[in-house]
Image (cartoon, coloured by chain):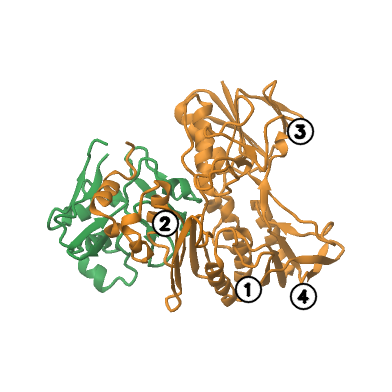
Chain colours: A orange, B green
Amino acid sequence: MKAVIIGNSVAGVAGATGFRSADADSEILMISSEPYRAYSRPLITYYLAGKVGEQQMYYCPADFYERRNIQTKFGAAAASIDTQARQVVLADGDSVGYDRLLIATGGAPYVPRIEGLDGTKYCTFTTWDDARQVQELLPNVRNAVVLGGGLIGLKVAEALNTLHVRTTMIELADRILSPALDTRASAMIKRALEETGIDVRTGDTIASVEARGTQVTRVNLRSGISLAADLLVVAVGVVPNVAVTAGSGIAVNRGIIIDDHCATSAAGVYAAGDVAEGADMLLGSPRVIPIWPAAYYQGRTAGLNMAGEDAVCPGIFGMNSVEVGGTCVVSVGLSTAEEGGEYEVMVSPDERANTYRKIVLKGDVIAGAIFVNTIDRSGIITGLIRDRVDVRHFKDALRRNDFGYISLPRKLRKSRLQTLGVKQ
Amino acid sequence: MKRIYAKEEVCIGCRLCEVHCIVQHSHSRNIIKAFRDELDRPSPRLFVEEGDALSFAVQCRHCDDAPCVAACMTGAMQKDEKTGAVTHDADRCVGCWMCVMVCPAGAIRRGTTGDKIASKCDLCGGESEPVCVARCPNEALVYEDRGE
């Protein structure tokens, strides 16, 4: 029995450890287009900012693969899959047979069509090499423009700014982090960024790019504003990296469609992480859930099932935690829902303390939440969402920043604190 | 595995568990020196929730399938397969707060001293009895294996 995993980030690694935990003997081969052992992609902005060094980038210890008897083929891109012959064809022409396959190829940066962009040395920011490339360009950069006000855009802008590069961030939506944050929370993060010296422009985008050869020199925004730019980072979004499935017959929507066992439409083939489209516990319809814990749980589920187990993926929903400009924000679940219809929203803003708390209720359960700066213990709310706990009897206490287990009815408190984390 | 369980019925809210947690993780491990001299003494990794005539300590449950381990993007949070403890590697932590966001017990907090990293119970690094349990004056904390 041979298990092949395409991808060497958290979903692939979780798949490999999941498989090994159930099957100590069968062959595992991990293939990755990148030459490195597993590293943490979210850390590339920390690497750029100089907050972490090379050793800290690695997600797994150096002997991770050897200790688990995992074969590796790094620096080798997978080009296509033949699901009939059960072969993965690599870009260099080699092919690898599999009995079970996990596609964990992650996401690829989306680059919109912008006049003048093609042919210039703009940067995208999803891999370690991207961070290295920006580092190499930095000595000649005085003005940087980051297109995209999502998580990557924010962290890149913050990193460049800490390196004393004059940075402008441009976001198309009316607010930054729009999928995760409501107007108020987003405004707080925007202000925090602006206070560090970053120029944040919302409701705008780049209409055209001017260059001298491959060197970007200026960007012209749709609003008419025009800025000098020695570095342009395009961070508007990431799309599932499904290229390897072309011609394979594997069902793909936005991402590779997976069921609750993380199995794809092809026998013996699984998918996990940013490339996959699976159940969202709160939305009720499948979507790509491009967050670290989703990749971990999907990867592990796939690995276990590849080894013959019958594992159902734990409930997954959107969540994000980020600190920028000294301001922390945690958003969980249906965080941007507004009062009305099936949702009840409770907000506790505190201008003086610069905190914000928002709880979204759907019927008797919590469906979403946002915490700005008052993030400690926010996990209690996440747990109440995940376990679909009926919160009717302590609804009002949820508004408080000091909400804790003391606010729960005694029976529920004792039951949770005794049994949380214990396999029943 | 042995876990720490709090007995709210007998907790007197004295917070000595927090004090001894601080001392145990301080530089000098001496209560007088830790509080008098150490400007960077750590915050307690467990903490007492207190209300009207009710108090109890909350600490990491060292979950069998820890959400913090799943959510940690640096590999700082790990489950020690031998001891069962969920350990946190301060050298790898970057303070992204994913763990704070997912801990259902709310047992992980942002550290308040020095590097911005997460703070949670480490079962006193494998001592036979965590100091909070050993030093509780009213036996409101027990360290036992409930066969789960």
- Compute the Cα span from label 2 to label 3: 44 Å
- Compute the Cα span from label 2 to label 1: 27 Å
**Residue named by callout 2:** B100
Instruction: Give the amino acid at mark 4.
Output: Ile
Instruction: Give the amino acid at mark 1.
Output: Ile
Quarter of the image where one finds residue B82: top left
- Compute the Cα span from label 3 to label 1: 44 Å
Asked if both marks, 4 and 1, belong to the same chain, the answer given is yes
**Residue named by callout 1:** A198
Q: Mark 2, mark 3: which one is toward the viewer? A: 2
Residue A352, position as x, y percentages in the image: 43, 79
Q: Do the residues bearing badges 4 and 1 touch, measured as CB atoms within 8 Å?
A: no
Q: Secondary structure at mark 1?
A: loop
- Compute the Cα span from label 2 to label 4: 40 Å
Q: Do the residues bearing badges 3 and 1 touch, measured as CB atoms within 8 Å?
A: no
Q: Residue placed farthest to the bottom in the image?
A: A352
- Compute the Cα span from label 4 to label 3: 46 Å
Q: What mark, if any, has residue A225 been given in the picture?
A: 4
Crowding at label 2, few (<14), some or many (≥20) Cα neighbours within 10 Å? many
Q: Chain of mark 2?
A: B
Indicate which disc, 4 or 1, sits on the residue closer to the N terminus. 1
Q: What mark, if any, has residue A92 been given in the picture?
A: 3
Horizontal side of A217 relative to A320 (left or right) equals right
> Which residue is more in the foreground, A254 or A91?
A254
Instruction: Give the amino acid at mark 2.
Output: Val
Indicate which disc, 4 or 3, sits on the residue closer to the N terminus. 3
Q: Secondary structure at mark 2?
A: helix
